[in-house]
């Protein structure tokens, strides 16, 4: 993964942690030829309003510290699952039930997964 992508992922993680995002997982697809991006960053929020706060925090950290803006943000209307597309990185912020149902971490068996410990 290149340095720009690593910096973006670091800032996405910082934005999630700033607002107490839980169970953060980074799925690295850089060694998978036909992957849609280089990485997923997946996290859980505890309510729709928490997911909205996490989304805003990620957007702010990425913009200020990695000079990156998402090309699209989908899912804010009901905030059960928000996807933020940064091109090489896609952020997924879920309610626990939706995250369990879609199980994105295990969609690509070849992806290297990094689980980030919760801060508290």
Image (spheres, rainbow, N blue to C red):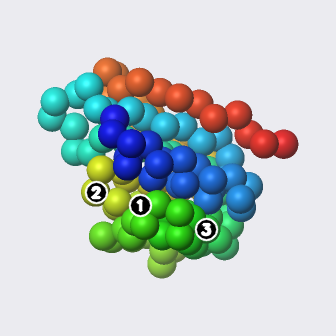
Mark number displayed over residue 83: 1
Give the Cα distance between marks 1 and 2.
12 Å
Q: Secondary structure at mark 3?
A: helix
Taking 19 as reference, is 30 above or below it?
Answer: above
Residue 46, quarter of the rendered image: bottom right
For marks 3 and 1, give the one nearer the viewer. 3
User: Taking 28 as reference, is 99 above or below it?
Assistant: below
Q: In whole angstroms, how far apart are the C-alphas of marks 3 and 1?
A: 14 Å
Specify few, some or many for label 2: CA neighbours under 10 Å numbering under 14, 14-19, or 20 or more.
Answer: some
Badge nearest the viewer, 1 or 2: 2
Residue 87 tag number: 2
Give the structural element (helix, strand or loop) at label 2.
Answer: loop
Question: Which label number is shown at residue 112?
Answer: none
Residue at the (41%, 61%) spot, across then down: 83
Given residues 70 and 62, the one toward you in this image is 62
Q: Image point 53% across, 63% down: which residue?
A: 65
Between discs 3 and 1, the one toward the N terminus = 3
In-front residue for pair 7/119: 7
Q: Nearer the viewer, residue 107 or 115?
A: 115
- Residue 19: x, y in percent? 71, 61
Q: Is 57 left, or right, of 99 in this rendering?
A: right
CA separation in Å, label 2 and label 3: 18 Å
Residue 14 screen position, x and y as percent:
63, 53
Which mark sits nearer the N-terminus, 2 or 3? Answer: 3
Residue topped by disc 3: 57
Looking at the image, which residue sits at the far left? 34
């Amino acid at each position: 993964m290149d340095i720009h992508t690593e910096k973006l992922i670091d800032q996405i993680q910082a934005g999630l942690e700033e607002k107490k995002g839980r169970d953060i997982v980074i799925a690295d697809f850089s060694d998978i030829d036909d992957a849609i991006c280089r990485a997923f960053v997946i996290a859980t929020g505890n309510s729709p309003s928490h997911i909205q706060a996490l989304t805003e925090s990620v957007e702010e950290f990425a913009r200020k510290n990695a000079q990156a803006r998402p090309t699209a943000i989908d899912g804010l209307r009901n905030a059960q699952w928000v996807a933020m597309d940064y091109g090489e990185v896609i952020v997924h912020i879920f309610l626990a039930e939706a995250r369990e149902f879609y199980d994105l971490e295990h969609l690509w068996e070849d992806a290297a997964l990094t689980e980030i410990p919760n801060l508290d």
